[in-house]
Amino acid sequence: MTQSLSVVVLSAGLDDFNQLRGALTADSRVQLLAGGTDIEQIHDEVVRLKPAAAIITLGANSDQAINLIQRLTTECPATTVISAAQETSPGLILQSLRAGAREFLRLPIKAEELKTVLDRISQSSVAPIEPLEPPKKKGRMIAVFSSKGGCGTSLIATNLAAYATARTLLVDLNLQAGDLPLLLGVDPKHSLASMVDNHARLDDELISALVTPCSPNLHLISAPKEADFFDKIRPEHVVKVLERLREAYDYVVLDPQHTFDAITVAALDQSDEIVLVLTLDIPAIRSTQRSLQIFDRLGYPRRKVRIVVNRWSKQVDIDLREVEKALGEPVIGSIQSDYQTAVRSINLGKPLIKSDSSSKMAREITHIAQKLYAGTVHIEEAKPRRGWSSFLKRGPAEKG
């Protein structure tokens, strides 16, 4: 017997509604209960009818539609909220997912894409009722991030992941320039593209087949080798992949891109901690301050952020205490500049803490890792941010 799927639709206009209605009613499972362009009316209909799904079109009033998604997600948890739009910018897609939408449909509707979404809703709605189980344990997710390239985030992420003694996954989200396989001396058969292609059916067995083993405790998901895959990886699918991966691992360490694109923000959203890396130069410090400001706008609590200084040297005339004052946040660790040691580790394809554990760099990274994994980082309440101190206002040659 075919399971009926009840649906309510908020459209941006008559044309959108007619197109959605035609696509939905072409599926024999769908029962279209209500539709319209009035947000409050559609809200009341969803609350009253409790449909299996509500399709919310993001048109000119996208802010109001996003607000409706948030309300429905809270008030009607049994209803699957689907966002739909003609504009498919990563920012808009991510905004709807953050509001609580579980699926995204591009307009005009493609029959195959709609069928896939309806299949998933149908499967979840007819699943047999089983005794309640405790929620699955989620592993801790740590993102190692810098909005400025060249600060050494990949080396730090690799070593933090290699330090963990529990089951750990390192994920390369630098989709255009990922090079973590070089740092680990492996040649992956699969990449994040494989995970995304199979995001709807990821189980433990499939995950094990798609990751690259690097050591007994450490596995890797590399960035796609082919540049073509970059445009095919959608933020909403990356969200689902990361959610599933943190159920399969004790720790998930992310190495994102150096931009605030939709995929990076989605990853930072999910992370329990963000290791924010900078070097002691004016552009990197300014970039770090901008990152903190963006984190504030995204609603991240400051206790989620851990600031680490990389390539520290006695020859640099910027004091760590001045950096802390400029950023209004403590530095939890600094890693000494040692080019030869770092390059030797990369050429060997082995993390520093394994290949040269007695080096100063390895000891400092180990100290940072111990703080992160033990949860002993001392976090102060956010201090009032001061203006840039005088050391940032030097000669014209140093202005960024």
Image (cartoon, rainbow, N blue to C red):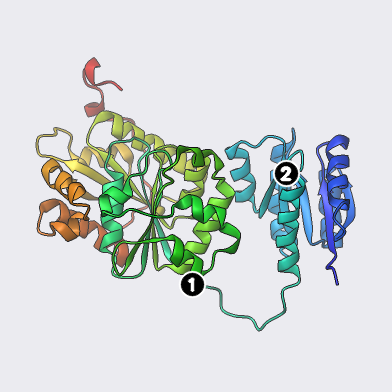
Q: In the image, is 319 to the left or to the right of 83?
A: left
Residue density around tag 1, few if under 14, some if 14–19, many if 20 or more, within 10 Å: few
- Viewer can see residue 375: no
Q: Pointer 2: what residue?
A: 84
- How far across and how far down the image is residue 284, in percent? 29, 33
In the rendered view, tell whether residue 92 sits above or below residue 35: above
User: Which residue: 18% across, 58% down?
Assistant: 353
Q: Quadrant of the C terminus?
A: top left
- Viewer can see residue 237: yes
- How far across and how far down the image is residue 290, in percent? 40, 34
Identify which residue, 313 or 196, lies in the foreground. 196
Q: Quadrant of the N terminus?
A: bottom right
User: Which residue: 35% across, 41% down?
Assistant: 146
Q: In which quarter of the image is residue 336?
A: top left
In the rendered view, tell whether residue 224 sits above or below residue 365: above
Query: What is the secondary structure assignment of the residue under circle 1?
Result: loop
Direction bottom: furthest residue: 131
Q: In which quarter of the image is residue 386?
A: top left
Amino acid identity at mark 2: Ala
Identify which residue, 366 or 182, lies in the foreground. 182
Q: In the image, is 370 to the left or to the right of 239?
A: left
User: Which residue: 31% across, 51% down?
Assistant: 181
Amino acid identity at mark 1: Lys
Q: In the image, is 260 to the left or to the right of 98?
A: left
- How far across and how far down the image is residue 315, in percent? 9, 35
Q: Pointer 1: what residue?
A: 137
- How far across and how far down the image is residue 253, in percent? 37, 56
